[in-house]
Image: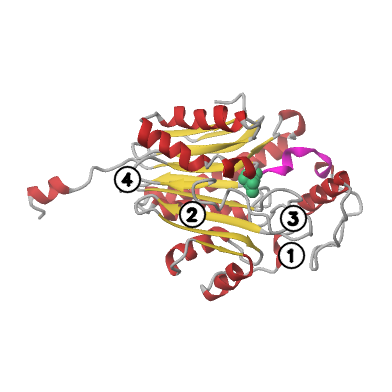
Amino acid sequence: MMAASALAQQPAAHHWAIVLHGGAGTIERASMTPAREAAYRASLAQAIEAGAHVLDRGGSSLDAVEAAIRILEDDPLFNAGRGSDFAADGRNEMDAAIMDGSNLKAGAVGDVTRTRHPISLARAVMEKSPHVFLVGEGADAFSVYAGLEQADPSFFFTERRWQDLVRELKREGLPIPPRPAGAPPPPAVPAAEMESPDEHKYGTVGVVALDRAGNLAAGTSTGGTNAKRWGRVGDSPLIGAGTYASNKSCAVSATGTGEYFIRLTVARTVCALVEYKGLALQAAVDEVIHKEVTGLNGDGGVIAVAPDGQMAWSFNTAGMYRAKLAEGGKLEIGIYNDEP
Ligand code: ASP
């Protein structure tokens, strides 16, 4: 039996909480079919439930973040892993980061091309290397070394994102690269959904979680932005810009046009407002999104969770795919900006 003094030293049990995003942007009811909307809602629910399941079994926030993101990376609806946007040279270059709020350890990768689950590669950088951030060929090579599942670049190909690339390059008057080797032949008649506008530009995924031990974690994974210059890295894998977690303040994952989020170090700024100014989490995310990001004419949003279980999201776009769930609470899913 445990002595009373030992019992007194046990940390107070925390109720777990998890928040997830699947990208922000011009996501409007008018450009969404009921079937597509239902598919997004189902995917968001599946991913957050996978993370919640880990937390409910007493698993760590890091494991929950990774589990939920792996599902979204495999889901072609989202711009991460399979279904990633293409760079202007016709390749998928993916970025991801993960951070452990309990010790500030972090791992990140930029412009990786062959790892089925970039979030797991980010975690491997954190746990199996002395570094925080690996990019390009070196990151691809480290993925093999770390024993992660490899995928042919054509695995990440989706017709929908390819058509987004072709449309954007035409609009900019830029050369259209050949269809990637191994991609399926082009459809005879483009599906109606490929004709729909902007919405596809987004779809980065991110998850933040609090576990029962009171530890926070954040993760983000993306194919970047449509028709980006190859070699470009966005905010998602930059610790402090698109991803940050500290048990002293909060865990944050961002989505939006990364260049603004980098310049404003959005994720760390949210945490700094909580840590040094004592702002409530919702006030902190609103301040950074609606004052700072909007003030620079940037677009996007963030999700966040704090050690006391506060959950928050904020975005200045027409929509952001999002979901939240806390122990004993009800699952909330939203897409448009007129939903709670
Ligand atoms: N933030 C991502 C990037 O700039 C894109 C997005 O979230 O839609 O790479």
Q: Give me the residue at 61% from left, 63% from top.
A: 116
Magenta segment, which residues? 194-202
In the image, taking residue 87 as reference, residue 332 lies left or right, namely: left
Amino acid type of the residue that numbered disc 2 sits on in the rendered structure: Ile
CA–CA distance in space, label 4 to label 2: 17 Å
In the image, taking residue 328 as reference, residue 5 lies left or right, namely: left
Q: Is residue 289 above or below residue 18?
A: above
Residue labelled with disc 4: 214
Task: In the displayed orientation, state which residue is furthest to the top.
Answer: 338
Q: Verify whether residue 137 appears in magenta.
A: no
Q: Quadrant of residue 290?
A: top right
Kindly report which numbered mark, 4 or 2, lies closer to the viewer in this rendering: 2
Kindly report which numbered mark, 2 or 1, lies closer to the viewer in this rendering: 2
In the image, taking residue 248 as reference, residue 49 lies left or right, namely: right
Q: Quadrant of residue 257?
A: top right
Q: Secondary structure at mark 1?
A: helix
* Magenta segment main secondary structure: helix
Residue labelled with disc 1: 154
Residue labelled with disc 3: 87
Q: Is residue 241 above or below residue 89?
A: above
In the image, taking residue 282 as reference, residue 78 lies left or right, namely: right
Q: Give me the residue at 45% from left, 31% from top.
A: 284
Kindly report which numbered mark, 4 or 3, lies closer to the viewer in this rendering: 3
Counting residues from the N terminus, which is met first, the one under dot 4 or under dot 2? Answer: 2
Residue labelled with disc 2: 98
CA–CA distance in space, label 2 to label 1: 25 Å
Counting residues from the N terminus, which is met first, the one under dot 4 or under dot 1? Answer: 1
Amino acid type of the residue that numbered disc 3 sits on in the rendered structure: Ala
